Amino acid sequence: MIPGIMTTTDTTFGDSGGRRNVTLRFPATEKEKQEILQAYGVKPKRIDQMHKLHGVREGSVCGDCRYLVGKHYDKTYFKCRFFGNSNGPGTDWRRKWEACGKFNERRS
């Protein structure tokens, strides 16, 4: 059980083979939910898919990759060129995620 839990939201993470159902029970923002899940070792499905398809690039993060692009609106939303862009939260990317095998370091 995850500490600090109050209300229920069901969220599924992982691929079909290793899918884990995690019940989040707290009124939190999406960012807070992701931080708590990451602390418990649960990766969002989109980065998990990239790691399964392309492998993991140890010691690198998505924020240092040239394929991570920022879409600037009232906030900046990061997207991975290889994963795609739905113009919605389903394709939002985090700079701190461990990079996949498609990692290509940004030029200065």
Image (cartoon, rainbow, N blue to C red):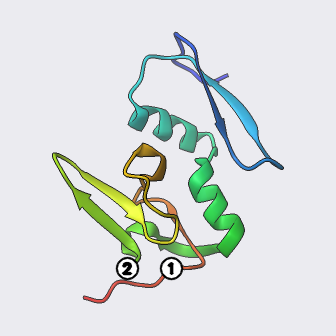
Residue 71 seen: yes
Residues 71 and 31: in front is 71
Look at 46% across and 53% down and name the residue there: 91
Q: Is residue 25 above or below residue 44?
A: above
Residue 55 seen: no
Disc number placed over residue 66 in the picture, else none = 2
Looking at the image, which residue sits at the far left? 74
Look at 38% across and 68% down and name the residue there: 63
Label 1 packing within 10 angstroms: few (<14), some (14-19), many (20+): many
| Quadrant in which residue 47 is drawn | bottom right
Image position, residue 8 (x, y; %)? 57, 14
Image position, residue 40 (x, y; %)? 62, 39
Q: Is residue 91 left or right of residue 73?
A: right
Q: Is residue 64 above or below residue 22?
A: below
Residues 44 and 83: in front is 83
Task: For mark 1, give the secondary structure.
Answer: loop
Look at 74% across and 37% down and name the residue there: 20
Q: Kindly indicate whether the residue at mark 2 contacts the one at mark 1 (C-beta within 8 angstroms).
A: no
Task: For mark 2, give the secondary structure.
Answer: loop
Kindly identify which residue carries mark 1.
Answer: 103
Q: Amino acid at mark 1?
A: Phe
Image position, residue 4 (x, y; %)? 51, 18
| Quadrant in which residue 12 is drawn | top right
Looking at the image, which residue sits at the far right? 17
Image quarter (top left, top right, bottom left or bottom right) of the C terminus? bottom left
Q: Amino acid at mark 2?
A: Arg
Label 2 packing within 10 angstroms: few (<14), some (14-19), many (20+): some
